[in-house]
Image (cartoon, rainbow, N blue to C red):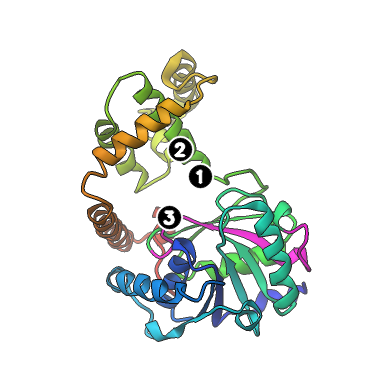
Amino acid sequence: MDVEFLEKRFTSVVCVGAGNIGAGWAAHFMRAGLDVIVYDPLPERQDWLDRFLEKAMPSLEQLGLSPNAKLDRVRFKANLEGALSGAEFIQESSPEVLSQKKDLFQAITDLAPPDAIVASSSAGFLAKDLRVKAKGPERTIIGHPFNPPYLIPLVEIAGGDEAPIAAAVASDFYRTGCEVVELKREIEGYIGNRIQAAVLKEIFYIYSRGVADLETIDGAISAGPALRWAVMGPSSVFYLGTQNPHMYEGFVQSLVDEIKAGFVAEAKFDPDEQLIAAYAQEGQQTVGSNGQAPLLELRSSGVIALRNALKRMASKAGIGAEQIGQVSLK
């Protein structure tokens, strides 16, 4: 891939896969005013995609639409070769099965134009594993979103150490409405999912010890650390935990001492099938007792309110929006 490719700008995107992630990406790219082709081998997914986009539209409008954003700019195709004809940027969002993704990357790079960038929405695979069969592996990277991509602005770019130009181009492109973080080197699960996994392990541990039920644990997180995390990352929060910044190293040592004293789950702790079943059953009976609809509405309205509030705060404070995790459409 030529360095001059860095100057390339995209006007269209191909989303490979029409599940929740692929459809969420389609909504995001449409919101940015781009032409979007969504490929899925199952023709019946077109109706599902149309319904998904219609349901997402109120949220997209509240977040702010590009002047060129229209639902009819999203087109569906069930033929991969036809979908990839003339492709500029390809966002792969197929099921999280490594062998299938390897074969799909091979097919995509065989059919797509040689200068098209291919980014995977994989939740944890390494780019070096996904690109083993790919033609032009230097143009394949990880572009991992948080679900749903049109609502949560984070995109993690991994694999750029072996595909630096593709990573740079993708990073610039994603910043149209996203908050981009680039990993210096690859690691399974990237950053966000590893932090989520650590939190989930603690939830299992607390629940297994009978400390609290799931609703109580959720409340302790959402009314406490989650509010601070919405504004700044944990390291920023910890830095504010000491009255004297010059003594910050000592404060950090005290946090580590708490970890060693038992503030985290035992290293050998491994949730068994019985615990997993109990957790899932209680989740269905309590936090999910009214189904997903009210929770989806709460998530959408709550995240939009937070993003818009942070945007106003950034504007009032005269700081860059990206400093508080809120990026506007360019």
Q: Is residue 21 above or below residue 195?
A: below
Disc 1 element: helix
Other-residue count near label 1 (Cα within 10 Å), few / some / many at <14 / 14–19 / ≥20: some
At 42% from the left edge and 31% from the top edge, which residue is drawn? 276
Magenta range is 131-150
**Label 1 sits on residue:** 193
Residue depth check, mark 2 versus mark 1: number of the one nearer the observer: 1
Vertical side of 211 occupied by 176: above or below:
below
Residue 168, numbered label: none
The image shows residue 197, relative to residue 64, as above or below, that is: above
Residue 85 in the image: x percent, y percent? 65, 84
Q: Is residue 97 visible?
A: yes
Q: CA distance from mark 2 to mark 3?
A: 14 Å
Looking at the image, residue 108 sits to the left or right of residue 92; the answer is: right
Find disc 3 in the rendering and name its residue: 323
Secondary structure of the residue carrying tag 2 is: helix
Q: Nearer the viewer, mark 1 or mark 3?
A: 1
Q: Nearer the viewer, residue 230 or 292?
A: 292
Q: Is residue 290 above or below residue 3?
A: above
User: Which quadrant: the C terminus?
Assistant: bottom left
* Point 52% across, 72% down: residue: 42
Q: Which residue is mark 2?
A: 235
Residue 137 magenta-highlighted:
yes
Q: Is 273 colored magenta in this rendering? A: no
